[in-house]
Image (cartoon, grey):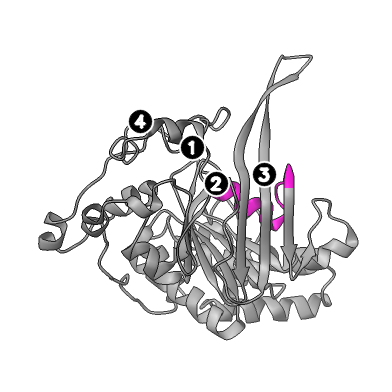
Amino acid sequence: MTAPPSPASEPALLEVRDLRVHFPITRGAVFRRTVGQVHAVDGLSLKLATAETVGLVGESGSGKTTLGRAIVGLLPPTSGTILFRGLPLSAKRAAPDRAGRTQLQMVFQDPTASLDPRWRVGASIAEPLRVNHVGTRAERRARVSELLEVVGLSPGHARRYPHELSGGQRQRVGLARALALNPAVIVADEAVSALDVSIRAQVINLLQQLQNERKLSYLFIAHDLAVVRHLSDRVAVMYLGQIVEQAAAADLYSDARHPYTVSLLSAVPVPDPTVEAGRQRIVLPGDPPNPASPPPGCRFHTRCWLRKKLGNPERCAAEEPAHQHVSAGHTAACHYAHQVPENVRLSTVVPTAEPASGPTSEPAS
């Protein structure tokens, strides 16, 4: 697939070029041999500007988390390049590369699993400082207290264990740990999906506040399209290891052009029954194909509702689509991006609605 042109007008802070992350499939108990590859991320390109939030959406198994982990260095890429401020980041953790890597941090989906249950909160937050030889022990303790206050907790929480905190408090601890080294980019992998609605609003407000104060850039991975719309400047839609559409958030939600994006938006519930009654629900048949043997041509063609309507299904099965330019900063990897029926696009538009706001901090109980 031809990489989409960058819609960002500013120079890229982080750039991913033709990234591939493949996992070997092996057989044999003693003499293990590779019999195939799982194409988790397959030829993906993406840019992220300073103080920008890019939302990354797609079904489970589309490769979103793998991409995030490869960006922060938790998974070695099979091929491709990751550039931070114009300089490539090596898959090997060499000393010259470490300074760049500390600028890329990650907040994980499950705050319980991402914190060591045997460590107090203060030790977990101080660990990045200790590993990178930042400050004395007293300075690290002071930094931990400062970070806890930044994320809306009290310094006294440093003495607690993760099981003594609520889910929202644990996620704040994970965010404090990610902020410890003053990163420029944070990859938030389903950072609010496991939280209650009221706590989710608090964490979303905190992420926005930190971005305004620190000029942070976020790669925000999520399933909740309403949250992605509220937080993101741009949205990239991922399917089977590739980006199939990307655009400014307002453009994507009002004028989606890839049939996969249209089907995702049609599944977003609207709380107004009158509006909901006039929307069209597009149900995709079956499950996504096996990433170990992706289909030829367009990877979405096996489930696409549009290909039969437009009269040339053979082209979709044989020819991989290039990214079509829809408008400024809006591209879609579909042969028929300019031919999606207007009545279908309009009937799946999600009205603008922001998630309920809440206080920016939790009670320090």
Say whether disc 1 or disc 4 marks the residue closer to the N-terminus.
4
Which residue does the numbered mark 1 point to in the structure image? 299
Residue 279 is situated, as x and y percent measured from the top left of the image, at 18, 55
Which residue is denoted by mark 4 in the rendering? 286
Residue 350 is situated, as x and y percent measured from the top left of the image, at 27, 62
- Where is residue 45? Give x, y as percent: 62, 55
Mark 1, secondary structure of its residue: loop
Q: Is residue 166 visible?
A: no
Q: Kindly check if marks 1 and 2 are in contact, taking CB atoms under 8 A apart as contact.
A: yes
| Number of numbered tags placed on the structure image | 4
The secondary element bearing badge 2 is classed as strand
Q: Which mark is residue 81?
A: none
Between 18 and 317, the residue placed more toward the observer is: 317
At label 1, which amino acid type do we have? Arg
Q: Nearer the viewer, residue 328 or 281?
A: 328
**Which residues fall within the magenta stretch?**
63-79
Earlier sequence position, callout 2 versus callout 3:
3
Quadrant hosting residue 144: bottom right
Q: Nearer the viewer, mark 1 or mark 3?
A: 1
Spatial CA span between label 1 and label 4:
14 Å
Mark 1 or 4, closer to the camera = 1
Q: Earlier in the sequence, mark 1 or mark 2?
A: 2
Which amino acid is tagged 4?
Gly
Residue 47 pos. (x, y %): 61, 64
The residue shown at (22%, 47%) is 281
To which residue does mark 2 refer? Answer: 242
Disc 2 residue type (three-letter): Gln
Residue 98 is a magenta residue: no
Note whether 343 is above or below 133 in the view shown.
above
Task: Identify residue for label 3.
Answer: 20
